[in-house]
Image: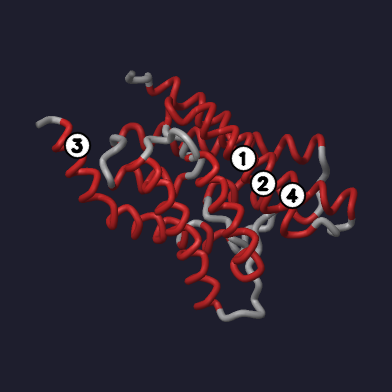
């Protein structure tokens, strides 16, 4: 079934809202009520749950991007058009902003509303490389499940799982955003803009690398469907 761009826009906005509320809200909630004692494992679990909800609720409609860097990956592989990129980007950014506003209103304003932050104890080269790696792994898992399963079965677990694992093992270096919209919203509302360059460059590079790695596979798959 082909869905309208308006329906895609709507579910992407809702899905990104849910993701940002869970991903950033978990960090703020931990700081507000547990003094940060829940730590990275809690911050990794929350987006995993959000993506389970998003992928299984909206995957058939929009392919469950919820992330501008993922949208670029899908554009490179030919899944969406240039016009649809605009719909996706707009929905993702609006959804993320609404998500951060929700966190601010109903959870709290600590830790810069859950803004991503790299660890400058490490070199900027390592930080940048790790953020590229995390984003490439996310896009690679997404493409693998789309190519093999079409967002069915355990696809939501796989996509949510790689995000959770990236955060669990890599957030202490790069912040493990992997998502420019998720990084933008809390940074804008908290005024913490100094690290946005990282999260609006490295994730796009990572997903682009993965997209070019899978592009020929999807082209061959589409060609075989017409034979």
Spatial separation of the CA atoms under disc 3 and disc 4: 43 Å
x, y (%) of residue 221? 21, 40
x, y (%) of residue 227? 9, 31
Q: Tell me, yes or no, whether the two marked residues, 1 and 2, touch with CB atoms within 8 Å.
A: yes
Residue under numbered circle 1? 19
Neighbour tally class for label 1: few under 14, some 14-19, many 20 plus, Cα within 10 Å = many
Spatial separation of the CA atoms under disc 3 and disc 1: 31 Å
Q: Tell me, yes or no, whether the two marked residues, 4 and 2, touch with CB atoms within 8 Å.
A: no
Spatial separation of the CA atoms under disc 1 and disc 4: 14 Å
Choose the circle earlier in sequence order: 4 or 2: 2
Image quadrant in which the N terminus is located = top left
Question: What residue sits 74% from the left and 49% below the top?
Answer: 113
Choose the circle earlier in sequence order: 3 or 1: 1
Q: Quick check: 121 above or below 114?
A: below
Residue under numbered circle 4? 113
* Dot 3: element: helix
Viewer-nearest residue: 40 or 132: 40
Q: Quick check: 145 above or below 115?
A: above
Task: State left or right for residue 97 relative to residue 69.
Answer: right
Residue under numbered circle 3? 222
Q: Nearer the viewer, mark 4 or mark 2?
A: 2
Choose the circle earlier in sequence order: 3 or 2: 2
Q: Nearer the viewer, mark 3 or mark 1?
A: 3
Spatial separation of the CA atoms under disc 1 and disc 2: 6 Å
Residue under numbered circle 2? 23
| Residue 167: quarter of image | bottom right
Neighbour tally class for label 2: few under 14, some 14-19, many 20 plus, Cα within 10 Å = many
Neighbour tally class for label 4: few under 14, some 14-19, many 20 plus, Cα within 10 Å = many
Q: Residue furthest front?
A: 153
């Amino acid at each position: 079934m082909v869905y309208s761009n308006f329906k895609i826009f709507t579910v992407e906005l809702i899905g990104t809202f849910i993701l940002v509320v869970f991903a950033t809200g978990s960090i703020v909630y931990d700081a507000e009520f547990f003094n940060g004692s829940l730590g990275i494992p809690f911050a990794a679990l929350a987006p995993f749950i959000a993506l389970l909800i998003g992928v299984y609720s909206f995957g058939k409609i929009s392919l469950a991007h919820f992330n501008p860097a993922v949208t670029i990956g899908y554009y490179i592989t030919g899944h969406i058009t240039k016009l649809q990129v605009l719909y996706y980007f707009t929905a993702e950014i609006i959804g993320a902003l609404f998500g951060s506003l929700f966190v601010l209103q109903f959870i709290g304003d600590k830790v810069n509303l859950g803004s991503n932050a790299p660890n400058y104890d490490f070199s900027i080269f390592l930080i940048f490389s790790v953020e590229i790696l995390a984003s490439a792994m996310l896009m690679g898992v997404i493409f693998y499940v789309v190519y093999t399963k079409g967002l069915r079965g355990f696809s939501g677990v796989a996509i949510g799982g790689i995000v959770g694992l990236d955060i669990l093992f890599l957030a202490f270096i790069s912040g493990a955003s992997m998502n420019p919209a998720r990084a933008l919203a809390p940074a804008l509302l908290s005024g913490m803009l100094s690290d946005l360059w990282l999260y609006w460059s490295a994730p796009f590079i990572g997903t682009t690398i993965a997209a070019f790695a899978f592009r020929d596979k999807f082209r061959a798959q589409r060609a075989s469907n017409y034979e």
